[in-house]
Amino acid sequence: MIHFAQLDENNVVSNIVSLSEHQCKDNHGECSEECGILFCKRTIDASSTWIKVINDQSYGSLCARVGDTYDSDLNIFIRPKPHESWTFDSDINDWVSPLGNPPDLTQQELINRQYYDWDEEAYQNDVSDPKTVGWVLSEAQDVTFVDIYAT
């Protein structure tokens, strides 16, 4: 399968389409990105911009999800901004908190199934200069599975 992202007028991914290699072949039987884009324009939306993507998380910034923004200068898809105070770091192609990474968990915190989560309200309400509050220790909640086939 070959994947294409449909971009809206703001370069935000509105749709991901999977095409077979057959749908991307030219008159000579060669599979090409251009033919895939033409197929998407002919069959889905001629007015949209289409970008070939690798729909596999292991490829990082070449992977697209609905809601991501395509940056043509960097040739990457950028996830939505997770928090108002975070900034985009183009060296790592990801959002970073104003306080950097969370603290390392202690062995006891790991045993207690705790993790650090960002608290934007705590960060915004921190009156210290520079701000030091943002990462808060949280506890993992148990997941309950519901049997959807139960009668």
Image: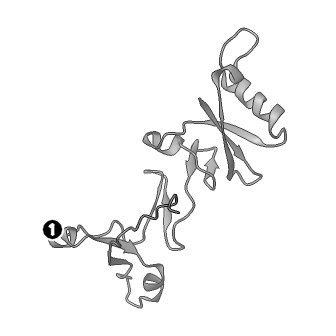
Q: Position of residue 84 (x, y in %)?
A: 54, 73
Q: Please rate how many residues cluster around mark 1, counting C-alpha atoms within 10 Å: few if below 14, some from 14 to 19, many from 20.
A: few
| Quarter occupied by residue 96 | bottom left
- Total numbered circles: 1
Identify the residue at horizontal 43%, vertical 85% (top origin): 122
Identify the residue at horizontal 43%, vertical 51% (top origin): 92
Label 1: which residue?
107
Identity, as a three-letter code, of the amino acid under mark 1: Gln
- Residue that protrudes farthest toward the front in the picture: 151
| Above or below 98: residue 147 | above
Q: Position of residue 69 (x, y in %)?
A: 63, 53
Q: Position of residue 53 (x, y in %)?
A: 59, 37
* Residue nearer the viewer, 108 or 103: 108
Identify the residue at horizontal 57%, vertical 46% (top origin): 64
- How was this image coloured? one colour
Identify the residue at horizontal 68%, vertical 53% (top origin): 12
Quarter of the N terminus within the rendering:
top right
* Residue nearer the viewer, 149 or 104: 149
